[in-house]
Amino acid sequence: MMLKKLAIACSFIALTAAADDRFANVEIKTTPIKGSVYMLEGSGGNIGVSAGEDGILIIDDQYAPLAERIAAALAEISPAPTRYVVNTHYHGDHTGSNAFFHEHKDATIFAHENVRVRLASDDKTAPATLPVVTYEDGVKFHFNGETIHVFHLPEAHTDGDSAVWFEQQNVLHTGDLFFNGRFPYIDLGAGGTVKGYIAAIETLLDKVTDDTIIIPGHGGLATPQDYAKTLDMIKQTNAYVQDLKRQGMGVEQIIEKGLPEEWADWSWRFINEERWIKTLY
Ligand SMILES: [Zn+2]
Ligand SMILES: [Zn+2]
């Protein structure tokens, strides 16, 4: 009995150590984009930053073990306090450091109301992680001489997605409505839909101009052309899968047949071709 307990304790420690190791070598890289707008990359969703005389606002905050490293990277940009955090949706790779910024930096967390509902429905969520201000359609920050427009897009990656538009600098943070150069993850279990995801990209592409700089949820900085390529890929692979489905093919048969070769390099560790076909099916 003792031995069994010890074994369980050891495997727990091993798991915890593995989880820590996963972040041990992550460094936060800062990229100045334009004026007061920056991007931070580490592990998890890309972080958008507005830094200036009014203070700091961040869009998403990656995983909890990275919180102090994110704060240190922000301090390099500006000594001003982090006053606001916006969550583009509830996933842990975008909300993991909420509690840190709320408790240690006194930041106020903003998100669509379904982000709060989904986080609150998980017993493991610390109360300090929860967004303090929630909205249905959106909210505008008048901050650092910029209009930062946060607005909701329905039933896309989840049921609580927001995109963020830095109006004067012409920078768009899409949250996970854009995985640059990869098959996107659409969280069907959390209210996401393929149809809504396509509609969200179309809405966002309608807003951009040729010189808009796009911060995707995952992947490197992008242009509207890159985003249009993603939309094209989704529409074409979706039409292909729907066509085979109409011909009576099951999902396993379509996986076996595979997508046309031209889409092969969109596959990645998390959403490979099989998972993307299942999502579309
Ligand atoms: Zn993500
Ligand atoms: Zn996500």
Image (cartoon, rainbow, N blue to C red):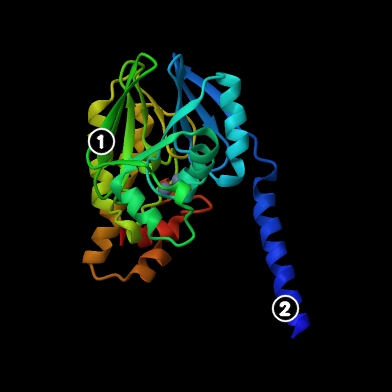
Residue drawn at point x = 30 percent, y = 58 percent: 241
Q: Dot 2 lies on which element?
A: helix
The residue carrying pointer 1 sits among few (fewer than 14), some (14 to 19) or many (20 or more) residues within 10 Å by Cα, namely some
Residue drawn at point x = 52 percent, y = 33 percent: 105
The residue carrying pointer 2 sits among few (fewer than 14), some (14 to 19) or many (20 or more) residues within 10 Å by Cα, namely few
Location of mark 2 (residue): 5
Q: Amino acid at mark 1?
A: Gly
Which disc, if any, is residue 266?
none
Outermost residue on the right side: it is: 3
- How far across and down, in percent of the image, does residue 252 sit? 38, 70
Q: Quadrant of ligand 1?
A: top left
The quadrant holding residue 257 is bottom left
- How far across and down, in percent of the image, does residue 276 sit? 39, 56
* Residue 242 visible, this angle: yes
Residue drawn at point x = 56 percent, y = 46 percent: 64
Location of mark 1 (residue): 138
